[in-house]
Amino acid sequence: MNNDTSVPLDRDDDVDWEMRPGGMLVQMREDELHAAAATGAAPPSRGPMIKITVYHDTAHHELFVPAQSTFGDVKKVLLHKTGLEPNEQKLLFRGKEREDEEHLHMSGVKDKSKIVLLEDQASKERKLEEMKKSLEIAKASEAVAQVRAEVDKLTERVDALEVAVIGGTKVEGKEFDVSTELLMRQLLKLDGIKAEGEAKLQRKAEVRRVQKYVDALDNLKGRNANPINNPSNAVSVTTQWETFENGVGSLSAPPPTQSPTKVNQDWERFD
């Protein structure tokens, strides 16, 4: 009785094979299957491996692929070498664009064949537009940053005027007018900056900042025309400023209170 239970050698329905250099057909290892899937490359098939050269602009890429691969499989491999998605690629062989479903060996692709890769025109135009937009945003951000640096210098001037007015020092009215004019010039610069995306948000924030200091100067000018000489009242006003969110606060004088003398006179009338 023959007790041999081994599987016949010609049954390979569930076995993946690959052609090794030198023409040796061997069973493909499990780790190679996983590696192919992880990289997006076409898994080795039961056909011979061929070397093809893909030309892309001034570069070229040498690929080792199964002869029975499709052009769609080749695109998946090229994704990791060029960064182009498969739908952004056009593969030409013998001067003709090939469809993803076409097989290399059926189209005449052999070992050492040459294939040309072209980027889809719509994809190229989209990338150029994105690059142009990025450059415009960077340019606008730089312009806003230059205005911000000028405003920083002007805020020091506003702060100095605020300290003087709060301290009861009389300041010439032209000082407020000049500072306001300089800030308004920065607003005009911001208005002339064409911005999108993040740069637009930066410009908007800087506009609000400049407007805040223009308002502060206007209030300071009014306060300077009617200075408060009473130190106790000045302290009270300072406390009011600290309660405002914008850090500047109201620069108008607090309403006057009744004098104690008048109250005494009223008491005397009742007597």
Image (tube, helix red, strand yellow):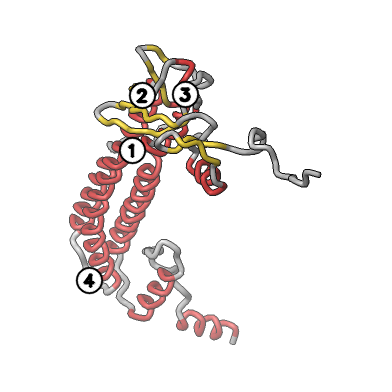
What residue is shown with label 1? 134
Q: Secondary structure at mark 3?
A: helix
Q: Position of residue 29 (x, y in %)?
A: 54, 46
- For disc 4, the neighbor class at 10 Å (few under 14, some 14 to 19, many from 20) is some
Q: Secondary structure at mark 4?
A: loop
The answer to whether marks 2 and 3 mark residues whose Cβ atoms lie closer than 8 Å is no
Task: Say which of 264 and 217 sits in front.
Answer: 217
Q: Residue at x 47, y 24 (%)?
A: 71
Q: Where is mark 4, residue-wise?
A: 169
Badge 3 density bin: few <14, some 14–19, many ≥20, Cα 10 Å: many
Pointers 1 and 4 in contact (CB under 8 A)? no
Residue at the spot of label 2: 117
Mark 4 or mark 2: which is in front? 2
Which one is in front, 229 or 176? 176
Q: Locate the N terminus by quadrant.
A: top right
Q: Is residue 187 above or below residue 87?
A: below
Lower position in the chain sequence, tag 1 or tag 4:
1
Vertical position of residue 15 compared to residue 88: above or below = below
Image quarter of residue 126:
top left
Q: Nearer the viewer, mark 1 or mark 4?
A: 1
Q: Quadrant of residue 232?
A: bottom left
The disc labelled 2 sits on which kind of residue? Leu
